Image: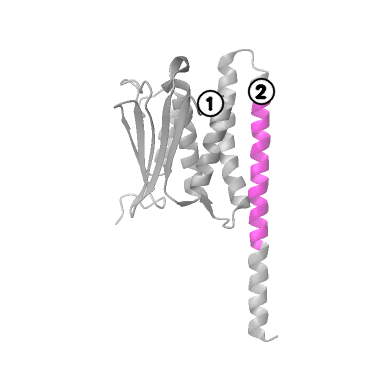
Amino acid sequence: MTEHEAAEQKIKAALLEKEVLLKEIHHRVKNNLQVVSSLLSLQSRGAPDEAPRQMSKESQNRVQSMALIHEELYQSKSLSELDFPTYIIQLTSHLFRSHQISSSRIELVTKVDDVQLGVELAIPCGLIINELVTNALKHAFPAGSGGKVEIELTQGEDGFVLCVRDNGVGIPEEIGLRNSDTPGLRLVRSLVLQLEGKARIERSEGSEIQITFPLIAGTAGKE
């Protein structure tokens, strides 16, 4: 073996070692988040009334949304980017089960470009989708009424556009992302700022929240 070939073998071995270590990190983070989720579940069961039980369940779903990301990265060929369409399907399926919502009552429609997101974008995006879909399942279709929830994510040259809409009763005019006192919408506002994005609410034929954000954090407003 020549000196050049030996150097190549060392580089390949080092890369393989780093890949194994990164997989192990994602696996351990996922396991730790699952432990937190289980603790929240136990706390929810021991709560004396419905309000704290609901708060614990919503916190559990937020933790689960992050755990799913690390699980997907652990199983993925790429350790740095997530197959986001697959992730959205898994996340929303979990939310429908968590809220005991039948797909025959509320239809879920996803229109997601085949995009790969790094962890720095995937985690806030996943949490935003978690909050907005949860809000729709809880409030848009009262008294057992049915309808449709749509998730749309498109990628352009300048960035992404994320839309979550429903054809339910709609978000009241007095509630906005800037003045909401609900923890979920406050979290959405904070995550949009983290993405260096912008958000707006449309209230025709239900509700639509549209969020635009750049391809890479730190590039908003730059040429």
Q: Residue at x 43, y 45 (%)?
A: 112
Q: Using the image, tell me which numbered label, if any, was put on residue 102.
A: 1
Q: Residue furthest bottom?
A: 2
Provide the residue designation for mark 2: 43
Figure check: 53 above or below 199: above
Query: Quadrant where the N terminus lies?
Result: bottom right
Whole-angstrom CA distance, mark 2 to mark 1, is: 26 Å
Measured as percent of width and height from the top left, residue 27 is found at 66, 48
Q: Which of 57 and 86 lies nearest the eye of the viewer?
A: 86
Q: Is residue 41 visible?
A: yes
Measured as percent of width and height from the top left, residue 37 is found at 64, 32
Q: Which of 170 and 89 lies nearest the eye of the viewer?
A: 89
Q: Say left or right for 66 vs 148.
A: right
Specify the principal SS of the magenta part. helix
Q: Is residue 178 visible?
A: no
The mark that comes first in sequence, 2 or 1, is 2
Q: Say left or right for 209 vs 85.
A: left
Figure check: 77 above or below 195: below
Q: Residue furthest front?
A: 104
Q: Residue furthest top?
A: 49
Measured as percent of width and height from the top left, residue 146 is found at 44, 22
Q: Say left or right for 170 vs 114.
A: left
Q: Residues within 10 Å of mark 1 (few under 14, many from 20)?
A: few
Q: Using the image, tell me which numbered label, if any, was put on residue 170.
A: none
| Identity, as a three-letter code, of the amino acid under mark 1 | Ser
Measured as percent of width and height from the top left, residue 70 is found at 60, 46
Q: Which residues are magenta?
A: 18-43
